[in-house]
Image (tube, rainbow, N blue to C red):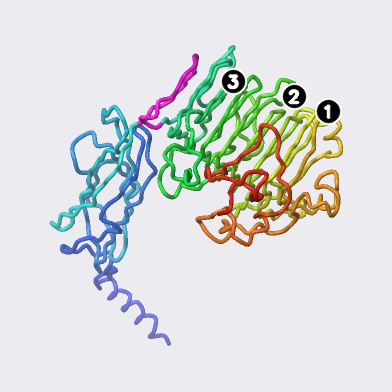
Amino acid sequence: MRYLFPLFLVLSCLLTFLPGCEPKEDLVQTSGSLEFAQDTVLFDTVFTTIKTVTKRLWVYNRNGGAVKTDVSLGGTAGSPYSLIIDGDAGSAKSGVLIRGNDSLQVLVRAVLGDNGQATAAKNFLVTDQVNFRTNGNDQNVKLVAYGQNAYFHRADIVRSNTIWRTDKPHVIINSAYVQGGQVTQVGVAVVQGVTLTIPKGARIYSHAGALIQVDGTLRVNDDFMPGTGATDTVKASNPNIVRFQGDRLEPQYSDIPGQWVGIVFTASSRNNSIRYAEIKNATFGALLYNPEGNTAHPNLTVDNTVIRNISGSNVSFANATASTGGGIISYSGNVTATNCLFTNCGEYAVLGVGGGVYDFNFCTFANYTPAFRRETASLTFTNEKATDARVHLPISLTLSNSIVWGSNLGVTTLDDELYLKNYPEYPTTGVLSIRNNLLRTKEYATIAAVVGPAGSNLNLLNVDPLFVRTALVSNRPDYTLQAASPANAPRRPLVVRVGTVSFHDLLNLPRPAPNQTMPALGAYEHR
């Protein structure tokens, strides 16, 4: 045993003279090249002057040993592209080490300049490349962006009657509207008494946090008059539809709610109309804001319009805050909607607070929200004043020939898609008429004041409308009706009201005349 310790000392000394064993993957080799996740980094349709999303380019070293590579942005000076190479921002970086069987990440962004074209009938192409020089081997990855010019609205105030042009899209950037010494908030503002007209085919894109605020009048698509023949269909892809959405056009943003704020109609706003339009990916589609319950209500008429992918909360505007998202939110406002589809609204399809007048005819509320756990009824109304719940204001609700359905997962509403707070008070100050609808409601299923007396057959209750495809089973939902849908005719006498008759559906397909075969419920006539 006494000889082991000297032996151990001898062996330790010998080990100090042995060469180090560096891992093979760390040894820099003098041959070999790189592989790339893709040969092109593509930015599809980018508005000029706005930063793109950041794209990732993965670079792979498939060799057993390490390599060093020089990375640089090609092209001439002033390239619209910028790089972050291995965590460092810059147009070039030399001697970047990539260990054997490891990878390198290069981040790419772009800000395209206006190419001077008068119109944006066609996108223009902006290209560059990222160069890699590894062990004498030159390789590159192409950078491609399709740019689009636009009308940009920054700190805009519409001071006189204005018609927006349609030769280029309109992009609303963060801005402030000042009137009477008060900053009212982000977006395009319409001064009281002034009318902003947005003609057919216009495209309105809003940056994150932007909104359109209307103190005067907004008229959308007044000039589009579709035909009245049996084949004059206005398809979802029709170029005459006016579209409102966020300014991120990459495919991954196509159905993401909350990308911009929405359209705000303040207490002074009057005679607003939105026709043949799509409003999507916002915190709210339309907000009528009269929280003090002034008896002269802001008012909005919506026809043949789709409001979808809506959600958000605590959005500030006009020195105020909207605490929730919704397809249409109304604080003591008047809303009339005909032939409209509301879907994928994470909080409410329609929220009416503080009274008001609400009239919905031939609408489909197919509020499937697969990405949200929604615990609120799609249609929610209360006559309680927004600023003082003890004060109850007059309210009128007329719901006819419509479908109210969805995927409510909440327990507080018992799967109801309809909630009328203080409903016995509605007829005393206004109107409560819910007739000839297909409704998802358990709470009101036996309450005659809401759905009519038992056996009256005024409404269809808690029967699946059998849409062709819902968002629960497809990323391409279709809320037209299957042939076997209980919402199809014939059924019961059509509810017809003066000034609200619609003989064509959301797609402009003809509905049968009231004295002939009964039309289908909802926004789509079944063919």
Q: Pointer 3 and pointer 2: residues touching (CB < 8 Å)?
A: no
> Which residue is denoted by mark 3 in the rendering?
215
Helix or strand or loop: what does disc 1 sit on?
strand
Is residue 328 visible in the rendered image? The answer is yes
Amino acid type for the residue under numbered disc 1: Val
SS category of the residue bearing label 2:
loop
Report which residue position mark 1 lands on: 391
- At label 3, counting other C-alpha atoms closer than 10 Å, the crowd grade (few under 14, some 14-19, many 20 or more) is many
Q: What residue type is labelled 3?
A: Asp
In this view, the residue in front, 464 or 64, is 464
The quarter of the rendered structure image containing the N terminus is: bottom left
Q: Is mark 3 on a helix, strand or loop?
A: loop
Instruction: Give the residue type at disc 2.
Output: Gly
What's the residue at 42%, 49% (across, down)? Answer: 251
Measuring 13% from the left and 56% from the top, which residue is drawn there?
136
Relative to the observer, which residue lies in front, 104 or 521? 521
How many neighbours does mark 1 have within 10 angstroms: few (below 14), some (14-19), or many (20 or more)? few
Say whether disc 3 or disc 1 marks the residue closer to the N-terminus: 3
Pointers 1 and 2 in contact (C-beta within 8 Å): yes
Q: To which residue does mark 2 refer?
A: 293
Residue 36: give x, y in percent of width and height. 27, 58
> What residue span does the magenta drawing correspond to?
150-169
